[in-house]
Amino acid sequence: MNNINIFLLISLLISLTFAFYFFYRINELSKKIKRQEIILNGAQKLSRMLYELEEQENFLREMWNILKTVTNADEFTYFKFDGIDTLIPEYVEGIYRDQILKTRLKLGEGFSGKVALEKTPKYLNSANKSNIAKHIPGTPNEDSALLAVPIVFNDELYGVILLTKLGNKKFNEEELNRTETLVNMAASLIAEIRLVNTIKNSFIEMLKALITAVELKDTYTAGHSLRVSKIAEIIAENMGLPATEIARCRIGGLLHDIGKIGIKEDILKNDTPLTPELREDIIRHPELGYKLIKKLKILESVAETVLYHHEWFNGKGYPFHLKGSEIPISSRIVHVADAIDAMVSGRPHSKRKTLNEAMEELIRFSGIQFDPLVVKVALQSKEKIESILKEDIKESILDDEKLFEIL
Ligand SMILES: [Fe+2]
């Protein structure tokens, strides 16, 4: 081989090495861009979810989907900080979910507790060989790697995201950076979800107080709103309506007369036939109720149930004289449930009826005051309605958080 050939061969080898090197770098770079794209798209999706007032659980599930892709972790735990000294696992994904959910960590305790206390992201490989990590009762003492990032917003600790790799898989610096990037982007959203939930809970507490106040103010027997809620729910279920419509009936039933809080007590308790002026006043209650509850976005659709709960099927009701299917189905159901409980409980100007008599009354006014289909299903649901009416309903039942679920 002459000198020129050797020179050509060396040049070719150098070119190939450079080509491979550049190819490798470009490949690595495009993988990195892809991962950043996943994080960025995910963050956008997460922030959209917040504006749609999605539940925290969906939000965290989406976070886990992104983190799983960019770190290859096997388990995900969101520890909520209780604001005092404890981390409580609120959302867990992975095979040891049930065991992890029972764990409580004090600040500084275990790996996640330390990360929370120091507000510094960290990872720990071969966690079972270290004395920092706390072994979770009920899980095998196998090798695992941990990666935890504190959720901090405006210097305030909200919780910790913990990722786990099972077996002898390890975390690295780059995975820590990726997780930290996403958690930092999500921290403000998590803080906001917490705030929205606090507002929502305070609002629900206020509604419960108002329901009780309305019942004390009006001529009702205690528990009327809750019975209407339960009867409406049974009818909606037996009509085969979708879950959101059933929830609308349950919550609409509970809140149907909340607008009476704005009506004078002597008008509500008046047991003589109402003069046109007094009637004018009392028929404002569906609109007052509507204005009160539509302020909260999640109760917007229930506000309509309340607004139309005194409309009649033939258009002779109030406030808008809507007819038939112009009236939302949840309002037609609540109207029937309200009538059943009012007849069975009795009112100052009308004697108590038995459930059979009330059912006869429904038939008599079917197609006039009441939707015939709702009447038909109410008749078929008679046994269940009877057991609701027999229940000893106490005010404390209003504490059942499920009453306000799914909307
Ligand atoms: Fe009413």
Image (cartoon, helix red, strand yellow):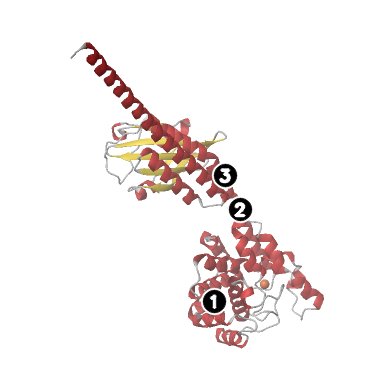
Considering every residue shown, the one lying at the far left of the view is 1
User: What mark, if any, has residue 301 been given in the picture?
Assistant: none
**Where on the picture, by quarter, is residue 228?**
bottom right
Per the image, the residue denoted by label 2 is 202
Instruction: Check disc 3 and report its element: helix, strand or loop.
Output: helix
Q: Is residue 107 visible?
A: no
Q: Position of residue 120 (x, y in %)?
A: 46, 30
| Dot 1 crowding, Cα within 10 Å, few <14, some 14–19, many 20+ | many
Give the mark nearest the N terminus, 1 or 3. 3
Residue located at (44% from left, 48% from top): 61
Name above or below for residue 383 compared with residue 141.
below
Q: Position of residue 253 (x, y in %)?
A: 59, 69
Amino acid at circle 2: Ser
* Most foreground residue, 91 or 10: 10
Per the image, the residue denoted by label 1 is 389
Q: Position of residue 358 (x, y in %)?
A: 59, 84
Tags 2 and 3 touching, CB below 8 Å = no
